[in-house]
Image (spheres, rainbow, N blue to C red):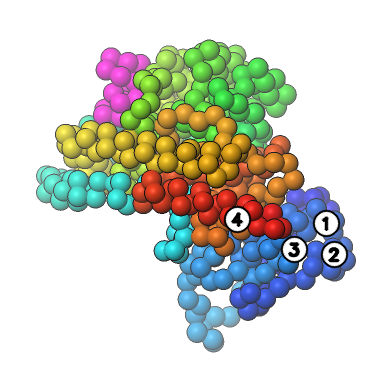
Amino acid sequence: MKERSSVTELADILRREVERYPEGRKLPASRVLVERHQVSPVTVSRAIAVLVAEGLVVSRPGAGVFRAAAFAAAPAVPAAPPGRTGDLSWQQIALSAESGPRDLFAAPVFATLRVPPPDVVDLNSGYPHASLLPERLLAAALARAGRRPGAWDRPPTDGLTELRGWFARDIGGHGGPIGAGDVLITSGGQSGLTVAMRALAAPGSPVLVESPTYSGILAVVRAAGLRPVPVPVDADGVRTDLLADAFAATRARVLVCQPLFQNPTGAVLSPDRRSEVLRIARAAGAFVVEDDFARLLVHADAPALPRPLAADDRDGVVVHLRSLTKAASPNLRVGALTARGPALARLRATQVVDSFFVPRPLQEATLELVADPAWARHLRTLGAELRDRRTAAVAALHRELPGVLGTHRPGGYHLWLRFPDGVDDTTLAEAALRAGVQVSPGRPYHPAEPPAPHLRLSYAAAESPAQVAEGVHRLRLAYEEPAG
């Protein structure tokens, strides 16, 4: 049996067993699971890690693995009363043709969306704190949009022409290579990424991804039946000295990258590498999917931003992805895919089959929002608040955990923390949650085995700079636990 298949099967068995345990009940020791299921210790360790990522169990160093408290798992929908359902076991056979349980792909995404209890400092979420979002501005935009003539008519499948034009100018600049006809309105960034992967890569084919990279990218790639192939990232972005070899070895036709404030490292693609990425991809006959998720999250003290790769691409190599969600609201699911030629036609066909179109009232409200002078003021305020939280996080890390912080850029909302070899980042993240701070273990951000233990710290969701500092202090307490 292949190792990945063994991990999947064992995780499925343990998941069913854990559901029968009361909260706090200890699972059998690893050696017992090895003997009982006739698998290797590595398989047991990886299966337990899957359950930890899902929030079903917690690992306590020196004590064992325990059924998690209710708050650690995703909110459950109440089950139907006894007698209302029949035998559902047939579904396991019906779903067995899939490459693996979809909940395994989605577990890291659920983890980033999980809302912690009120007494836990959130240094995990990718969405800014509610106090940093323009709720009054959004409410006014929605009210005005609802009164627009035709606001509730069916929109064009590609999106409102006016909104497509706004994205084209925002991405490519006035008079740039991108026109309104090159833009497809999507239901946010994650949906746009899903459309791009399904449209540009054949099922079963390899897709080059940065390593480490956003776990949601890996989830989309795997759920589409594709194979993520890592290309390492350093302080200057994706390693172009390895990129051509990766294309040649795999014959991949898609590279997914985040040139600006990369998630999770925060790296910005250097000027020399920008041109190299386009040249190498063009020579390989491949597309570059540019996930420009953080352009609106630039800090007040950041230097001038580099242009999107799409703004310098005239050959249709770049498929650009942009979303307003993070800077506006988790509920404003409006983004844009930009492409030209047959690639755009493929994207259009994929999206229309999946979801028809983005609701017109949301598109109208987005137009109202970005046309309001208060939108630009909001972005400046957001940049100042993110700067202050980053400053607090960096100072606290130097004070509490010297040596774990590598390079960082003034933008986005991530810090990538490197811990000494031998530290288990999943176990450390669990200990941090017990200490009252939620962070992300580094393992889910790697498409293959991680080279070192990391944690991702996201400071945007914290209520204040002081809360960021308190969260780092709690992280130090977790790191100093005797078993850590």
Q: Are marks 3 and 1 in contact (CB under 8 Å)?
A: no
In this rendering, the label closer to the viewer, 1 or 4 = 4
Disc 2 and disc 3: Cα gap in Å?
14 Å
Residue type indicated by callout 2 = Arg
Q: Which mark is residue 62?
A: 3
Disc 2 versus disc 4: nearer the observer: 4
Residue shown at 64%/28% (left/top)? 232
- Is 32 situated above or below 209? below
Give the mark, 2 or 3, whose residue is nearer the N terminus. 2
270 in relation to 166, above or below: above
SS under mark 4: helix
Q: Which badge, 3 or 1, is on the more N-terminal residue?
A: 1
Single out the mark in the foreground, 2 or 3. 3
What is the span of residues highlighted in magenta in the rendered image?
165-186
Mark yes or no: residue 18 visible: yes
Residue that label 1 marks = 41
Give the left or right position of residue 299, taking residue 417 as reference.
Answer: left
What residue is rendered at 51% in x and 64% in y? 74
Specify whether 77 is left or right of 25.
left
The amino acid beneath tag 4 is Ala
| Secondary element at image label 1 | helix
Between disc 3 and disc 4, whose residue precedes? Answer: 3
Residue at point 60%, 26% (across, down): 234
User: Tags 1 and 2 in contact by the CB under 8 Å rule?
Assistant: yes
Residue at far bottom of view: 83
Residue of label 2? 31
Label 1 to label 2: alpha-carbon separation: 7 Å
